[in-house]
Every structure is written in C-alpha cells, then in structure tokens.
Image (cartoon, rainbow, N blue to C red):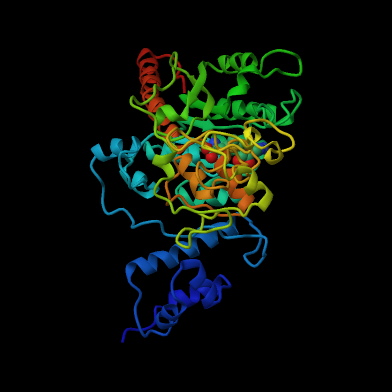
Amino acid sequence: MKPAPDWIRQGRQARGLSQAALARLTGLPQRRLSHWERGLRLPDPADVAAIRAVFDRLDAETAAGLPGRRKARWRLLHGGAGGAPPRGRIEAAAVDAFVRGIDPVFSHRRALALAPTGGLRALSLFSGCGGLSAGFAWAGFDLVGHVEIEAAARVVHQANLPGCPVLGADIGALADDALAALGTVDVVFGGPPCQGFSLTGKRRVEDPRNLLWREFLRVVGIARPAVFVMENVRLMASMRTPAGGLVIDEMTAAFAALGYRLTMGNLNAMDFGVPQSRQRWFVIGSRAGEPGLPTGIPGPPRTLRDAIGDLAPLDSGEADARDPLHFAVRHPPHVIAMLRDVPEGASAHQHPDPALRPRSGYNTTYKRLVLDAPASTVSTSFGMISGSRNVHPRATRSLTIREAARCQSFPDDFRFFGTLGQVRAMIGNAVPPLLALAVARHVEGLVPRVRLERTTYRLQGGCSTS
Ligand SMILES: C[S@@+](CC[C@H](N)C(=O)[O-])C[C@H]1O[C@@H](n2cnc3c(N)ncnc32)[C@H](O)[C@@H]1O
C-alpha cells in the first residue's frame, strides 16, 4: 500500500475544514476521503482535481476577504466540476459550431481551451462576475487584470478566469501608477453601473453612479489602449447631465480629446447566438478611425426552448438534486392560483377572472415567457414571480438560477458563488458571454490597424501614438 497522500489532510486542516465539510464541498463520499487520508487507497486524477478546485476556491475567497466560511449567511451555491476537463485542443471549426450554439456541449473550459494563445492584452473594468471578460478570454485575449467593487463578484471572476488578477476593488481608488505599471494594454473594456441610467432604477441625472464613466475615461487616458469598449443600458443614449446636456455628447468630446473616434449603438444579444432579447448600448472607441460595431450572426434567433428545454421540469418549490443552481422558488398559493391557467406570453393581469388578477402593476409583471421565442431580458430580479416577464412558460414559478444563466449564455461549467441575491445580481447584470465574444472578435480586428500606424510613425521618425 502506498503512503497516504498527506496533502489532502494537510490542505484540509490548513483551511479549517473537517473531513465532512470537504466531502460536502467536493461532492465526494467522506468514506473515500478517509481512505485516501489513511493511505488505504489512492484518489484518481478526477478526484484530485475536485479537491484542488475546492482548495483553490477557498483560497480565492480568503484572498478576496469574503466573510468566513462558517457564517451561515454565506451560501456556497455551486462548486460542481461541470463536465470533464478539456483534453487537448479542439479544431478551429468547432469554435464556430460552439459560438453558434450548434454544439450542445456548451463549456466555458472548452471555450478557453479553444481560444488562440498569445493574444492581445485586455484590461477589464467594472468586471462583475465576468460575462464580458469571458467573451474576451474565449476570443483569445490575455486578461491583464480586473477591477470590481463587490467581493463576491471578484471571487466568481477569479474562479472562472484564474489567470486574470484582481487589480483593485473601487476603481476610484486605483492608483495611476498601478495602471501605468501594466505595460501594453491593447483593449480596455467594461460596463460602468447602469442603475442611474436604467428605467428600473430611478434615472436621476445627479446619481453619482452616472459619473463612473469618467473613471473609465481616466483609465483609458493612462493605459492608452488601441481600442476601448464601454457597455451600458440602452437608455444611456438619452441620459442628461445635471447641466442639461447629453451624457454621450460629453463622453464623445472627452474621448476625442484623448484621440479616440467613437461608434455607439445598440446591440441585441439575440442577434449573436444568445437565446434572449437583450439590448445593450455599446460605445467602442478607437485611435485608428471609425471602429464600427459587430454585425449579427445570420439565421433564426435561438429560443428559450433551446436554452432550457433539456433541464429538469420543476414546479414551485422543487429542486433538481443534480444541479444546485436549478431549484424553483416556492411561491404562495394565492400567486400560484393567479397564474396557473395563464397561457404562455400572457400576464396574470389578463386573467379572465378579475378576482385572480394582481391588485396593481403593469401587464409585463406576473407574465409568462414564450418557449419558442428568445427569452425576455434577464434582470437581477428574475427570481421574483411578480417581476417583469419572469414566469416559466409552462410551470407556475419564476426562473431558476440555472435557467437565467443559460438565457445569458453562461455555460453550465461557469461557476457561481455567493448568496442567492448576489448570484442573481451577477447574472442579471452581466453581458452575455456570447455577445461579448462577438464584440471581442470585432475589436480584435481593429487593433492591428493601430499597431500598423505606430510602426508607420516610427518609420517616419515621428512620435509614437502609444
Ligand atoms: C453592469 S455590472 C458589470 C457586469 C460585467 N460587465 C459582466 O459582464 O459581468 C457593473 C459592475 O460595476 C461594479 N462597480 C460599481 N461601482 C464600482 C466601482 N466604484 N469600482 C469598481 N466596480 C464598481 C458593480 O459591482 C458591478 O458588478
């Protein structure tokens, strides 16, 4: 019998875990852990990977200063391995099948494995859990760092994009020197918070969050990327400054002063393989002429059925034991009575029996989605049955976290951690990774033009644009 693999016991004890806790977190039977620790058996490589993944995650949580593991408030949602690790590289043709959603095995790890290496260098701001970052990583960008104020979101970003270090929490506290020390940054991307601009928020012109784009501007001024990508809600286009001007006019002038030409416009995620109608406002800036926007993928949009059709059917209060993210909120009987007979695409406000209609609210609330159409925009409140278009097309309940993540094109092996509220917020705030991938590929095509321009300048003996 070989000696005990002491690293399991030592690693577990160093992280303050009982054997039972490690069994729970890894999903491995405690009896087997005990056998391995006592040297009676050896773990196979998949078990080793599962244990290491838990250790890595706990270390990332500790590094990010999250609340202690023992605090009941902190709920570990999903630590599952999510499919076999990629074996070698997969031929390029598979990438497009994957992107177009033809490939049913939709895997974050596979996308990372498929990504070309040695790519351009990108910096992620207002990173959230990493929807936008994931798309850039899948396109082959090297992520030089990310900045995100929410500790829980940083943990998720780190767990899924481990090569991308945390540069800081509050972007306002990020020192100019730290940014300058990053070296060449080809692309800066990020989505400043949109609550001040959005209809679901109060849409106040003096909301301090509306000024965070200026922090984005500061970073661009220091990092001097060839291209930047800023994402926000559609309504940003019409938002006014306290002085009465349009925010986007102020933005255009400020970035022009740094030498950037801008293209701005709406992109709908459903045009890029995402099974959801989700309009987002993109501002792309380039130092080498008109950047333009990516064009959509031809073909019919993917539907809610494409996204969630294979998931276990659940009623209110039920859970899928195989997937910790696929559980249905338990709704009160009077709400279920209001919605039970409401057909797909309709709202309880349209119930033939007035007694079963909600007392107040819009027709978009208590509303069922349509299975054979793209999902409606997933917001942070997708778990609330009373929210806007959050009701499953057939079952009388709100969407599960897994369903919302699928609608956002997060592969099942993209891991989420945190409280239920935190995870729902991360998912609802994210740029769908498939949309991000299309943006990243578009942007990639813009960068060499600037590099060429740099070379030209040098040949002419002029000053570099970098
Ligand atoms: C719209 S979300 C970004 C989502 C992200 N693009 C994605 O695809 O997952 C905006 C993020 O900015 C973060 N944030 C807000 N204020 C910040 C600040 N002062 N510094 C850094 N991050 C901030 C929020 O916590 C939130 O996660």
Question: Measured along the vertical axis of the image, is residue 200 above or below residue 13?
Answer: above
Q: Furthest-front residue in view?
A: 353
Q: Quadrant of ligand 1?
A: top right
Rendered residue at 57%/39% (across/down):
342
Q: How many marks?
A: 0
Residue 149 in sight in this render: no
The answer to whether residue 129 of the structure is visible from this angle is: yes
Residue 364 in the image, given as x and y percentages of width and height: 62, 32
Image position of 187 with respect to 162: above or below = above
Residue 6 at x, y percent in the picture: 43, 78
Q: Could you say where residue 411 lies in the image, as x and y percent from the top left?
A: 42, 46
Relative to 118, is 73 on the left or the right? right
Q: Quadrant of residue 49?
A: bottom left
Q: Is residue 368 above or below residue 257?
A: below
Percent of width and height locating residue 222 = 57, 28
Q: Nearer the viewer, residue 110 or 101?
A: 101
Q: Nearer the viewer, residue 411 or 205?
A: 411
**Quadrant assignment, res 463:** top left
Relative side of 359 to 110, left or right: right
Q: Image point 35% across, 66% down: which residue?
A: 46
Quadrant placement of the N terminus: bottom left
Query: Which residue is more in the foreground, 215 or 208?
Result: 208
